[in-house]
Structure formats: structure tokens, C-alpha cells
Amino acid sequence: MIAQIEGLPAGTLGFRAHGQVTSADYENVIVPDVEAAFALNRKLRLLYVTAEDFTGFDPGAMWDDAKLGMRHFSSWERIALVTDVGWLRTAAMAFGFAVPAQFRLFHGSELDEAIRWVTEAASAE
């Protein structure tokens, strides 16, 4: 399940992943929110947090994530991933160079720092 994180400045989207994230989660929550935000902003910042009950992504969700990222390849400004999930941290470190934005990885205990970092560009505009 995906839940939107409220209270972030315009141009910054936040999502919290719970349990097993499915393709339906992307299609019903993330994609509509991202597409609506891109209709209003040339560049977006993204905060993605895995909750303590996060168990993973199904293959359809991973494919939807890749498609969404590619569709807006050069439109991401900053992306913060907040997770303590070992395999996800390893994948993010291995492939972070391919992210077409400023990308930072944070531990769960660093959520406040991640929010400050991902939104500071939004606040400075």
C-alpha cells in the first residue's frame, strides 16, 4: 500500500510504502499524483519512505516505477529515499548514479533530515 505524505511544499511529493506495494498502488496513487504535479511544475522533488511494515514490491509495481521514472526522466530535481531495508539500500547505492536528479539515501531515523534536504530547493525558489 502507498500513502501520500501530506504537508510538503508545492513541487514536492511524498509517499510512504506499507506492506507489499503493488502495481495497483502505483496506478491508483502515485501515477495520478505525479502526473497532476507535473501538469503544474516543470521539475519535481520526491520523498519516498518505506514504513517499518514494508515487505517489498511486486514485479508489476517495479515495472510501473521504471516506466514512470522514464516518462519524466529529466524532470526530477531531487529524490530522497528513506529506508532501512538492506536490499533496497544496496540497490539504491548501486544504481543511484543513474537517477537523473540529485539523489540521497537516508536511514529511517533521518526522516526529518530527508524532508529538509528534499524540500530546501522548493523553499529557496
Image (cartoon, helix red, strand yellow):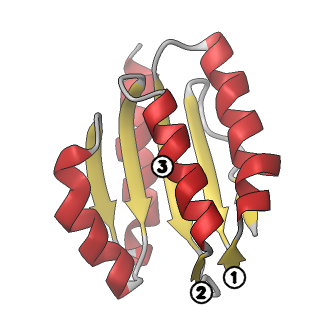
- Name the residue that disc number 1 marks: 19
If the image is split into quadrants, where does the N terminus sit? bottom right
Does residue 6 lie above or below 2 as drawn?
Answer: above
Does residue 70 lie above or below 1 as drawn?
Answer: above
Q: What residue type is labelled 1?
A: Gly
Distance from disc 1 to disc 3, alpha carbons, whole Å, reads 20 Å
Q: What residue type is labelled 3?
A: Ala
- Name the residue that disc number 2 marks: 55
- Residue at horizontal 66 percent and vertical 24 percent from the top: 37
Which badge, 1 or 3, is on the more N-terminal residue? 1
Q: In this view, does 15 lie to the left or right of 66?
A: right
Which badge, 2 or 3, is on the more N-terminal residue? 2
- Residue at horizontal 39 percent and vertical 51 percent from the top: 80
Q: How crowded is mark 3: few (under 14 residues within 10 Å), some or many (20 or more)?
A: few
Q: Is residue 99 left or right of residue 85?
A: left
Q: Where is residue 30 in the image (x, y as percent from the top left)?
A: 69, 46
- Residue at horizontal 45 percent and vertical 64 percent from the top: 111
Which badge, 2 or 1, is on the more N-terminal residue? 1
Q: What residue type is labelled 2?
A: Thr
If the image is split into quadrants, where does the C terminus sit? top left
Q: Identify the mark at residue 66; answer none if there is no mark.
A: 3
- The answer to the question of whether label 2 and label 1 lie on touching residues, with beta carbons closer than 8 A, is yes
